[in-house]
Image (cartoon, coloured by chain):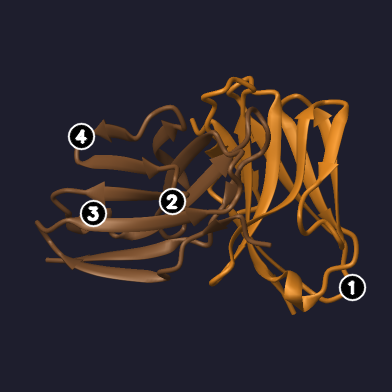
Chain colours: A brown, B orange
């Protein structure tokens, strides 16, 4: 049973436009959510996170939105840059337990 | 220097061989993890350890074993490698705080022939 779902395997956007990556989850006990970014030949790196007590967290060009009633979170990148091209993983956790990852979405930002 | 290192970075082996992948960290974290990444399947947890005396199976532990030799070292072994264990393997570490994030190593690309 997949608790964290990223239903779009890939996304392509133009440079300067907004990228929206989506993530759905099934476990209502999740209380902390993270996004990781992965370039080829490198390990994933932490990008941004949000606690379940918030509905938005912003860090520069990156904003994560959490809709608990819909069990949905999204990552917005504005404006998108070619260097943002990577695989993005959504992850979630209950308390201090281990993370559960989605399958990832490959973002391509075209110049 | 990298906080989380993995050796080897690339490995080709044959079916039936025993191999070990090693992970070391300098972040002082208690928690360490082994994941594998396959195309279209994301990151799947193999084993994890919350401290030196704690070892737990993840979602895909069959065919793998681990050893936590010290707080900073966590090794993954394939006792008898098979071709469907061909994948990219990542080690990660974290502390135990609520807002902890995992820090990943650069990965080991394993090919089992």
Query: Residues under labels 2 and 3: Cα distance?
Result: 31 Å
Q: Can you give x and y, in whole percent of width and height, for residue B74 in the image?
A: 76, 37
Q: In this view, does B73 lie above or below A109?
A: above
Same chain assignment for discs 3 and 1? no
What residue is shown with label 3? A83
Residue extending furthest front?
A: A69
Give the structural element (helix, strand or loop) at label 4: loop
Could you say which disc has been placed on residue B16 in the image? Answer: 1
- The first of marks 2 and 3 along the sequence is 2
Name the residue at 35% across, 50% down. Answer: A74
The answer to whether residue A62 of the structure is visible from this angle is yes
Left or right position of B31 against B15? left
Left or right position of B49 against B104? right
- The first of marks 2 and 4 along the sequence is 4
Query: Residues under labels 3 and 1: Cα distance?
Result: 41 Å
Q: In this view, does B29 lie above or below B83?
A: above
Give the structural element (helix, strand or loop) at label 2: loop
The quadrant of the picture occupied by the C terminus of chain A is: bottom left
Name the residue at 82% across, 26% down. Answer: B52
Q: In this view, does B11 lie above or below A100?
A: below
What residue is shown with label 2? A70
């Amino acid at each position: 049973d997949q608790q964290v779902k990223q239903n779009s395997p890939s996304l392509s956007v133009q440079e300067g436009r907004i990228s929206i990556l989506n993530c759905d989850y099934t476990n209502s006990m999740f209380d902390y959510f993270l996004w990781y970014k992965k370039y080829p030949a490198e390990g994933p790196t932490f990008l941004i996170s949000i606690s379940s007590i918030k509905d938005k967290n912003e860090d520069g060009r990156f904003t994560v939105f959490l809709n608990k009633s819909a069990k949905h979170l999204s990552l917005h990148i504005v404006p998108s840059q070619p260097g943002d091209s990577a695989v993005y993983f959504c992850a979630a956790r209950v308390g201090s337990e281990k993370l559960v990852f989605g399958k990832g979405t490959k973002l391509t930002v075209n110049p | 220097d990298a906080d989380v290192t993995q050796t080897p970075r690339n490995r080709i082996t044959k079916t039936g061989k025993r191999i070990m992948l090693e992970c070391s960290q300098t972040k002082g974290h208690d928690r360490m993890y082994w994941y594998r990444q396959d195309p279209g399947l994301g990151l799947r947890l193999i084993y994890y350890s919350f401290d030196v005396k704690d070892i737990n199976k993840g979602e895909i532990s069959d065919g793998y074993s681990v050893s936590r030799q010290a707080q900073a070292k966590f090794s993954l072994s394939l006792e008898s490698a098979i071709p469907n264990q061909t994948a990219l393997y990542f080690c990660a570490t974290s502390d135990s705080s609520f807002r902890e994030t995992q820090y990943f190593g650069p990965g080991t690309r394993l090919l089992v022939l």
